[in-house]
Image (cartoon, helix red, strand yellow):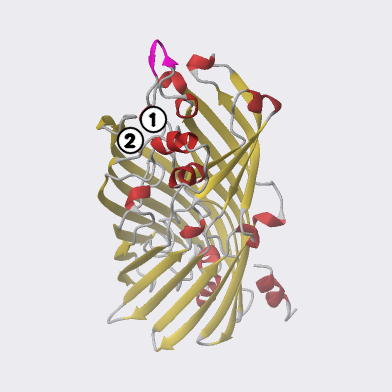
Amino acid sequence: MAGWPILTLIACSAVAHASPRTDPTTGRAVFTGATVPHATSISLNPSALGLGTINEVYLGVMAVVDQIGIDRQALAPDGTTSAGPSIDDTLLAPGGMIAIIYHPGERATIGAELRTTPSERFLDNPGVRYHALGGGQRDLFISIGSSIKATTGLYFGASISHNNTSLRLRYARDTALERGVDGDCDGEPCGFENPAASEVYDFDLDSKTISTSNLRINVGVMARLYRGVWIGIAYHTPPGFAIQSQLDGPVTVTKAPRDGGQTLEGGGTAYIHFPASVDVEVRARLIGNLELHVGGRWEDLSRMQAYDVRAYASSFRAEGVPEWTLRPRGFEDSFALWGGLEQRDLGQRFQLGGRLGVETSATDTARTSPTTIAPLSFTADVGAQLRVTPSLIVQLSYGLQFFPRVTVDDSAFDPRDQIACINSGYDYSTAACEAVREGYAIPTAAGDYSRIQHAFRLGLRYELP
């Protein structure tokens, strides 16, 4: 029996949020972190589970609310700009988890969870239809993790998770860019973004139900640096340890009104380079029952430049539907740092905490778009815990992430590149054709962007006898 914890450790993982934006209710949120023996550590840093001593069941409900404002600029074929549509929208993304933590002995701890993180959602507004018409990404995790106590000041942990991903991509394509902006659209030249030339695509894709390509691994370590001072470090792999993930499913294409508006059906695939990530936290005991928490996260988002989308059907080629398209995200590596004070749980009825932080931009200003609004941002998190009975604990945390308004004057998205590439005879050495290949030769994303994100977590912990 002495060897079974090691076998569990070998079989175990971290679940970084598979969406490009990591779950804001975990790690940064009060009562969670890479040094905290919390149910979220099954995925965040499983080595931290060993610091706890009580068996427990955890039920969590999460939600992320995004308030997004966009004042787009419209671009004409002659290069002149004018005020475009204004969008003011709120996107809600719920999530939830159930977990159990069990300590079979002094040196081993195991945990398991079923979790769906708040999804990444895309705007559904005709004013940004060439970038998004709704949809988003949702992930479901089944995980098991283990922590092994090497010494009183050193813990190792790992977990393994089977991650099922669903991706819905809906967007429009301006067919006038390839067939001529001087073409006829209801008796007038089409120009850019004419609804009569708008062709709508709808990809409904999923990862395989059961596959080793869905496995994610997380490894972590906890070490005591000094009396009352701990450091936790964890590394999260992309799913399948592969260069890219593959999602498959049906695709529907609705032809532009000027082309008859008929519906075509076929199959689709998206290849995605999901990021790896690293979480770090230092926890230090201060006077009284106060603790200092300083944490950070790095995400390898530069891997995720675009959704590589393929469409297959015998009718698609005859109808001019492209077989291959890149849908840009334009990410770059992101670094987040936060710190704050929390009361230690010493069995008291109430426990409070708060944190402040900053996160670097996850995309260049020129590549900001309705699907990727991620400039330098600032975070504030608060939390409260109530011990209802000796065994039942309620935790509530709230996080605010404020993204200062960003103005995009020179957008990387420029439909004129499509025209220039065609006029060059598809000379792929030109900058215009490079923009076409990378998916940026679509209607402009120039304009003003604002975003505020709210993150909520309600957790119920029941300590088992």
Q: Are marks 1 and 2 in contact (CB under 8 Å)?
A: yes
Indicate which label's residue lies in the foreground, 1 or 2: 1
Question: Which residue occupies the extreme right position in the image?
Answer: 1
**Residue in the picture at 44% in, 47% down:** 431
Q: Is residue 76 left or right of residue 184?
A: left
Residue 354 figure quarter: bottom left
Task: Please state, as top left, top right, bottom left or bottom right, where the N terminus lies in the image.
Answer: bottom right
Q: Position of residue 384 (x, y in %)?
A: 33, 60
Q: Is residue 180 magenta?
A: no
Q: Which numbered disc, 1 or 2, marks the residue that appears first in the sequence? A: 2
**CA–CA distance between discs 1 and 2?**
9 Å
Q: Which residues are magenta?
A: 184-189
Q: Position of residue 358 (x, y in %)?
A: 30, 63
Task: Please state, as top left, top right, bottom left or bottom right, where the C terminus lies in the image.
Answer: bottom right
Local SS, label 2: strand
Q: Which residue is mark 2?
A: 89
**Disc number placed over residue 125 in the picture, else none:** 1
Chief secondary structure of the magenta span? Answer: strand
